[in-house]
Amino acid sequence: MSEYYTEALVLDWEEVNNSDAFVHLYTQKLGKVRAKAVGIRKITSKLAGHFQPLNFVNVRLVDGGSLLLVDGLSIKKIKLTGALIAARIIKNAAAEFQPDPVAWNFIKAIFMSEDEAKLGNFLMLFKAMGFEPASDKCSFCRRGFISVFSYADAQFICGNCVKDLKLSENEIQLL
Ligand SMILES: [Zn+2]
């Protein structure tokens, strides 16, 4: 059984039942993880307020085969329009259990800055997470300018190719 104390950004919740949820976190020490929070959906939960999506937190996680969220405190609540989209990008694009200091420092800085322009530069966010487009041209047709990231292919593609490939909104991120 291992225990971790780490800073983290709360990305999302996934309901398990009426009392429990999986909390998706982007952590400094473990990279992206999903931890079960027992009782967090109960009205009496002391953790629920601290672990709302987009909060920066200090969290204590216990790994006994699967990850449990046992304690924590929010450091800062982020209230920016672009933050939800940035959190969705991190949830979809970051690798599980692969801590990345460059990505962590970048993500923490843009969220803490409360600067909409920095937070809304999704191409920079992808680059910080290691997805560097080879050029500004579409990886499929090599002609159109990149305007979309395809999660399925982990490629930067143009608007026309998105239509040709019939990718749904869940499979792509507009840049
Ligand atoms: Zn294209």
Image (cartoon, rainbow, N blue to C red):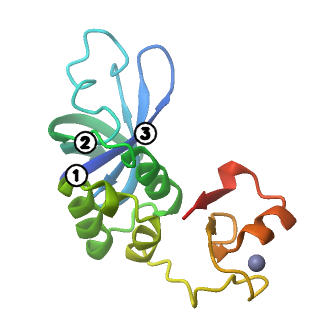
Q: Residue at x 57, y 90 (%)?
A: 134
Q: In this rendering, is residue 99 above or below 63? A: below
Circles 3 and 2: CB atoms closer than 8 Å: no
Q: In which quarter of the image is residue 129?
A: bottom left
Disc 2 packing (10 Å; few <14; some 14–19; many ≥20):
some
> Closer to the N terminus: mark 3 or mark 1?
3
Q: In which quarter of the image is residue 149?
A: bottom right
Q: Is 46 left, or right, of 52 in this rendering? A: left
Q: Circle 1 sits in a helix, a strand or a loop, which is it?
A: loop
Q: Which mark is residue 12?
A: 3
> Closer to the N terminus: mark 3 or mark 2?
3
Going by the numbered disc 1, the residue's amino acid type is Glu
Q: Is 77 left, or right, of 39 in this rendering? A: left
Circles 1 and 2: CB atoms closer than 8 Å: yes
Which percent across, then down, holds residue 142?
Answer: 74, 89
- Is any atom of residue 2 visible in this view? no
Which residue is under mark 1? 114
**Gap in angstroms between the C-alphas marked 3 and 2:** 13 Å
Q: Residue at x 27, y 44 (%)?
A: 62
Q: Quadrant of ligand 1?
A: bottom right
Q: 48 or 83: nearer the eye?
A: 83
Q: Which residue is drawn at 58% across and 86% down?
A: 136
Going by the numbered disc 3, the residue's amino acid type is Asp
Q: Which dot, 3 or 1, sits closer to the camera?
A: 1
Quarter holding the C terminus?
A: bottom right
Which residue is under mark 2? 78
Which percent across, then down, holds residue 82?
Answer: 39, 49
Question: Assess mark 1: CB under 8 A from ligand 1?
Answer: no
Question: Assess mark 2: CB under 8 A from ligand 1?
Answer: no
